[in-house]
Image: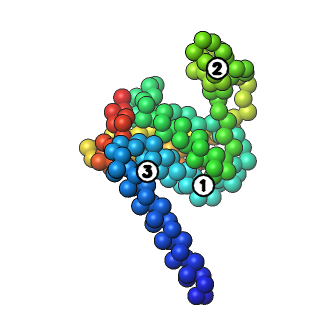
Amino acid sequence: MKKIVMIFIFVAILFNISFSESIKYNNENGKNSSIYVREIALSIADQFNKDKISEYIKSKTLVILSIVNVNNYRQASNFGRYISEDLIHAMKINGFNILDYKATNSIIMNKKGEYLFSRDIKNLKKERNITYALSGTYTIYKDSVTINCRIIDISSGVVVSTAQITVPKMILKKMDYYYYN
């Protein structure tokens, strides 16, 4: 029993040091948006991972879409795209089977570089075996922003899992992309 308590204390101290370094790094360097976005995405992924249906969802294909402003479903902001991109990583490391729908059939090469991703619908693969989509909205309040995410069964439209996080505006003000529109 004593060994278990000592291990627990060691892990708690190690976690605290690691977390403190992250905060220290942010304060010393001013704006370090990527750490905040990563923490938001990891929190959302962790909530999905704890859902009882997550093991079944992990056996199917999941596509992650842009998180959009609740007042404008047809336009993604930098904020929403950044969260979505980090969700690809966070969900994948939690064992979800992620399909990147932006990948093309072949590599696109031009004078500006080589690319695999495209937003041009005619360059995207036509047939995908997608079972679920992770979608979401963010709502701007006076003192915070709430991000609501859902995993939706593509064939039925049924919401099978949800996750939510509220981020204080004082944190968002430290992000380079504070403006969401």
| Labelled disc at residue 121 | none
Residue lying at 36% horizontally and 29% vertically, measured from the top left: 181
Of labels 3 and 1, earlier in sequence is 1
Tell me the residue that label 3 is attached to. Answer: 165
Furthest residue to the front?
28
Query: Looking at the picture, how far across and down is residue 65, in whole percent?
Result: 55, 34
Q: Amino acid at mark 2?
A: Glu
Tell me the residue that label 2 is attached to. Answer: 114
Q: Amino acid at mark 3?
A: Ile
| Labelled disc at residue 49 | 1
1 vs 2, front mark: 2
Q: Are marks 3 and 1 in contact (CB under 8 Å)?
A: no
Label 2 neighbour load within 10 Å: few <14, some 14-19, many 20+: few
Q: Does dot 1 land on a helix, a strand or a loop?
A: helix
Distance CA(mark 3)–CA(mark 1): 15 Å
Label 3 neighbour load within 10 Å: few <14, some 14-19, many 20+: some
